[in-house]
Image: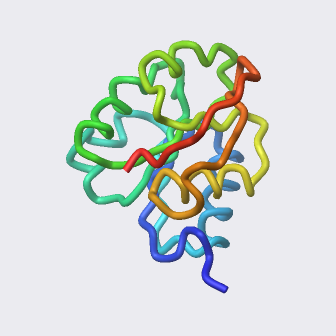
Amino acid sequence: MPHLLDGLRILVLEDEFLIAMEVEQLCRDHGANEVVVARDLTEVDGRKIALQFDVAIVDLMLGGASTLEFAAGLRETGVPFVFASGYSDAHEIQVSFPEVRLVSKPYSGQDLVEAVALAYGRGSPGVETDTAASGSRFNVQPSR
């Protein structure tokens, strides 16, 4: 049975070392071909590096700096992504990125894998899920 992330090149923006390592291993366990972790926005050169990846997992805050501008760049270049964040106010994400899935920390590995696969266009695009903060329900659509 093929894995949901088979062959994908995944960029992970996560500043918490242990979480970053767990996400990297999770992606590899589900078939990702390449996983690159960046713990700070200075480690990634915006659109240039983003184009090297098929999909990204973006923490909302890296070392106290917002990643929303970087996420906007991902959207502009057509790189699908999901937010994976413990940030308690999801309103800013819902307003700026209504089409992007927010996987709230702490999350299950399966939830994250399914969200990444769906963002890339794998899986069932009409899957009903909970938003992180409001508890309201919406249909997740691929961001690709």
Q: Is residue 106 above or below residue 11?
A: above
Q: State the residue at coordinates (52%, 42%).
A: 82
In this picture the colour scheme is rainbow
Q: Nearer the viewer, residue 93 or 140?
A: 140
Residue 9, percent across and down? 42, 65
Q: Nearer the viewer, residue 101 or 68?
A: 101
Q: Is residue 58 above or below residue 89?
A: below
Q: Nearer the viewer, residue 130 or 76?
A: 130
| Residue 120 placement: quadrant | bottom left
Residue 143, percent across and down? 42, 45
Left or right: where 117 falls relative to 51: right
Q: State the residue at coordinates (67%, 72%).
A: 29
Left or right: where 2 falls relative to 50: right
Residue 123, percent across and down? 58, 62
Q: State the residue at coordinates (70%, 33%).
A: 104
Q: State the residue at coordinates (25%, 54%).
A: 51
Callout count: 0
Q: Is residue 143 above or below residue 40?
A: below
Residue 21, percent across and down? 65, 55
| Residue 134 placement: quadrant | top right
Quadrant (top left/top right/bottom left/bottom right) for the N terminus: bottom right
Q: Is residue 17 above or below residue 65?
A: below
Q: Residue furthest bottom?
A: 1
